[in-house]
């Protein structure tokens, strides 16, 4: 039911004032429902993050990033995120990554070219400030930010192994390129988490095509997110 309501709001009202109001009300209800069963400090952190800027994540989606990144912090390997926007998800990852390196990638001029599978999006959508993200995360150690179209900016991490990767790139080409880059660099048990799998046709197609000949299956979460757990690591 929550996914149905969220999809209805996004599909019918999108970025209009009515859509933004609907999403704020939906998020308020989610936080209220989470109170009896989640740690109060974590819920406060989620609420504070949402008040800092204009996040594109629902409270439950932020919690999923927090929970999965925290679990992966016990594994060998670094963390990465492709699609940083204003740094909300990067900040929640920073709260649980410990001393791990976190590599962040974004164009900061918005989405690159889109194709027919990406009809919810358009070129240059979701532009953000590199300097704003840098300042927002400056108190956290071992965070590196790279500007440009991934994987053209990935040379500094080509020899790294990863325990957790978060993708929020919205479109088919970028999703497929990120999967191709990170898949063989994931450690056993490492997780690739994506936003928008349930509501962006390009993201869904990229994952489904990429995993067609792989042993991993896609695991969908309650709203738009999905993830894979790497079963076979190559070192």
Image (spheres, helix red, strand yellow):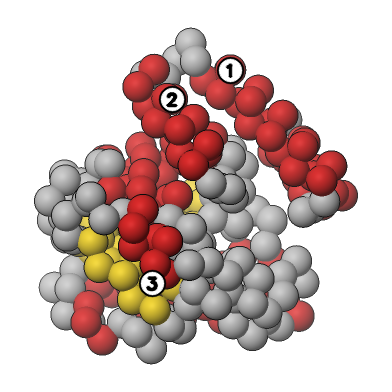
Q: Which residue lies furthest to the top in this view?
A: 36
Bin the neighbour count of mark 3 within 10 Å (Cα to Cα): few under 14, some 14-19, many 20 and up. Answer: many
Image quadrant where one finds the C terminus: bottom left
Return the x and y of residue 184 as percentages of the image width and height: 28, 74
Marked residue nearer the N-terminal end (1 or 3): 1
Return the x and y of residue 132 as percentages of the image width and height: 42, 61
In the rendering, which numbered label is found on residue 32?
1
> Label 3 belongs to which residue?
105
Bin the neighbour count of mark 2 within 10 Å (Cα to Cα): few under 14, some 14-19, many 20 and up. Answer: some
At 82% from the left and 46% from the top, the residue drawn is: 17
Marked residue nearer the N-terminal end (3 or 2): 2
Return the x and y of residue 37 as percentages of the image width and height: 45, 15
At 59% from the left and 76% from the top, the residue drawn is: 111
Tell me the SS state at disc 2.
Answer: helix
Image-quadrant location for residue 67? top left
In the rendering, which numbered label is found on residue 43?
2
**Up-down relation of residue 206 to residue 68 (above or below):** below
- Alpha carbon of mark 2 to alpha carbon of mark 1: how far? 10 Å
At 17% from the left and 73% from the top, the residue drawn is: 160
Tell me the SS state at disc 1.
Answer: helix
Comparing 164 with 95, the one in front is: 95
- Alpha carbon of mark 1 to alpha carbon of mark 3: how far? 33 Å
């Amino acid at each position: 039911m929550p996914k149905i309501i969220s999809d209805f709001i996004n599909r019918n009202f999108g970025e209009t004032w009515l859509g933004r109001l609907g999403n704020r009300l939906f998020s308020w209800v989610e936080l209220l429902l989470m109170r009896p069963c989640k740690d109060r400090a974590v819920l406060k952190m989620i609420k504070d993050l949402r008040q800092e800027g204009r996040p594109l994540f629902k409270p439950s989606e932020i919690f999923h990033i927090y929970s999965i990144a925290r679990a992966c912090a016990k594994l060998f390997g670094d963390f990465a995120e492709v699609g940083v926007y204003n740094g909300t998800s990067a900040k929640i990852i920073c709260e649980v990554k410990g001393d791990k390196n976190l590599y962040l990638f974004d164009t900061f001029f918005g989405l690159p070219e889109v194709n027919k599978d990406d009809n919810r999006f358009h070129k240059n959508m979701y532009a953000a400030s590199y300097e704003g993200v840098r300042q927002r995360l400056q108190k956290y150690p071992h965070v590196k930010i790279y500007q440009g179209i991934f994987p053209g900016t990935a040379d500094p991490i080509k020899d790294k192994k990863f325990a957790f990767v978060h993708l929020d790139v919205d479109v088919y080409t970028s999703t497929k390129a990120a999967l191709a880059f990170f898949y063989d660099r994931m450690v056993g048990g490492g997780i690739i988490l994506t936003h928008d799998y349930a509501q962006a046709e390009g993201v869904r197609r990229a994952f489904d095509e990429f995993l067609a000949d792989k042993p991993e299956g896609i695991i969908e979460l309650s709203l738009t997110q999905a993830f894979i757990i790497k079963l076979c690591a190559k070192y």
